[in-house]
Image: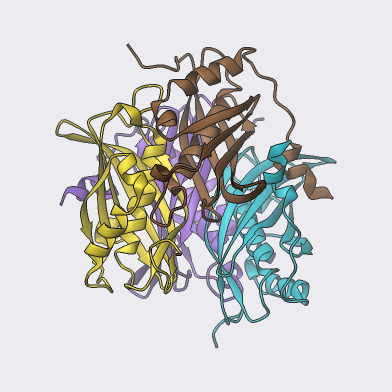
Chain colours: A cyan, B purple, C brown, D yellow
Amino acid sequence: MPQAAQTPAEQPSFQPRNPDFERRVRDSFARQPFMAHCGIAMPVVEPGFVEMRVAYDEPLTQQHGFLHGGLVGTVADCACGYAAFSLMRAEDSVVTVEYKINLLSPAEGDELIGRARVIRAGGSLMVCQAEIGMREGKAERACATALCTLMVLKDTPDAPRT
Amino acid sequence: MPQAAQTPAEQPSFQPRNPDFERRVRDSFARQPFMAHCGIAMPVVEPGFVEMRVAYDEPLTQQHGFLHGGLVGTVADCACGYAAFSLMRAEDSVVTVEYKINLLSPAEGDELIGRARVIRAGGSLMVCQAEIGMREGKAERACATALCTLMVLKDTPDAPRT
Amino acid sequence: MPQAAQTPAEQPSFQPRNPDFERRVRDSFARQPFMAHCGIAMPVVEPGFVEMRVAYDEPLTQQHGFLHGGLVGTVADCACGYAAFSLMRAEDSVVTVEYKINLLSPAEGDELIGRARVIRAGGSLMVCQAEIGMREGKAERACATALCTLMVLKDTPDAPRT
Amino acid sequence: MPQAAQTPAEQPSFQPRNPDFERRVRDSFARQPFMAHCGIAMPVVEPGFVEMRVAYDEPLTQQHGFLHGGLVGTVADCACGYAAFSLMRAEDSVVTVEYKINLLSPAEGDELIGRARVIRAGGSLMVCQAEIGMREGKAERACATALCTLMVLKDTPDAPRT
């Protein structure tokens, strides 16, 4: 099938420039208060890929009782950011330029799962794709898909200016 | 200036189909637990326009100490949703189809202000534009801009199926 | 790998509602003068999937001698439109609501290849994803990726009002 | 009205870094064969703003007889590109990173008019907004709106590598 060559699943695996990338990504994630505030965990960090999860919780919902679309967008944005960050040099940091998200179905179920992967790793820009699903019991259903552009901030610490 | 005719500021004002639109929008907003969880207020509701505000608060920040991009996206999405909802019939409800947001500068300052307006009100789809700014003292700086597509759910209550 | 369930390659195959979908898609394509004007062909039409191709031609280029980004966007938009149209009833037609495209590398090479697939087929909206590549000899390189939202126009002919 | 401060009409005017920007923008435009192929003209070039026009012509249409959405996207992309290019140094050139476009109504009428303005001019990225209208006689109707991100290619000529 000729189209297979184009799917994200066929992307070559990435070599991280920073061998200590996982610790750096997890450390940055831990310094984002909004992640804890929203109950977002990040169980998987690989070169150019991260997975995030959020258990259903009533304060995170909208008026129909589903997880809020803003939470879905937050997971898409953050997962893309850390997928990109995992491929950066230890001296650089990352900023989101823009993203676009299509909400495919209500975020109804037990747990939101967001998976983001780098689909283009340039010297100054990275493009990531995120797929967001909802798990209900053992079944998972597609909930949203996003495309995100991120910029490499060269020689910039991933922490407040002090 | 010929281009002036195209700017959002020149959009005709909208006639709400539901004279009680403001109460309906505010009631729906109040039933979204995630709004309170994120400290989001909605001081202004007009036909086809809403304004939302979030005071700076440490749990809402990212690793540089700015308000989190996910919060900025949440405000853009919700403000667009309620701008659209304000123009709907009392029998209909609204769902976000997709949005795209460009983050223009860090969300640094005292208060985030999101303003969304309907730029196209169709029978089944609405398109809204949101401008997000950060107020620091009396000055305000552009922080993000978004385009959002929303769908009219005909004869659908704005509440959980029971 | 849990993430595999989320990739487009794993989407279930679609059942066309119109058994004569291929003839209807090809007939519509043939009635678009801009397709011929841009040298765009559509070698593959399957349920929920189409492939388009454009041979390199100097009138289609930009100032660096690459195929123009507007052409890349045109192929992304049209391929998504016909992927969606292939799943519609014989009585309905399709209109593009919006799309977002990331240009990943210059459209440099012998032939542009666009592949679009439906990732969400709703009753009134469809969401498609397009991957655009450039073939140079036997090698193909990713050139752009797009997400597109389309609306079903119920009981509407795919031809001018007369 | 506080929201007025956020509208594009209120953006500060830009100072071009290259005093000869108009000649450079027009020269680049003239070297894009696809512009002539699509009958696109660029009557206005100002710092951070350009206007493009396309007269209705049958080869540029889709199956309903309207101007093709791919042409609308091409004008949005190009107008944004030259609005950004007008603010760059004489040594730099521009490349489109991504864009998102909402099609608001069919491109039906005598002439398509695209107006793009820079809404954020950063050192390495620029964000532009385009409004596309259709003129029919003396009336003009909104047809599409777009957001576009462009990258500054430092010390890169706006011409093929030779």
Q: Is residue C46 above or below residue B21?
A: above
Residue B53 occupies which quadrant of the picture?
bottom left
Q: Is residue D60 in sight in this rendering? A: yes
| Residue B137 position by quadrant | bottom left
The one nearer the camera, C92 or A42, is C92
Left or right: B2 with respect to C30? left
Q: Residue at x 75, y 62 (%)?
A: A42
Q: Quadrant of the C terminus of chain C?
A: top left
Q: Determine the residue located farthest toward the bottom in the rendered image.
A: A162
Would residue D47 be visible to someone looking at this image? no
- Residue D73: horizontal and vertical position, in percent? 40, 42
Q: Which residue corresponds to the image point at 39% horizontal and 30% vertical from the top-left?
A: B122
Residue C65, horizontal then vertical, whole percent: 43, 53
Q: Residue furthest front?
A: D162
Camera-nearest residue between B46 and D24 = D24
Q: Is residue A28 above or below residue D116?
A: below
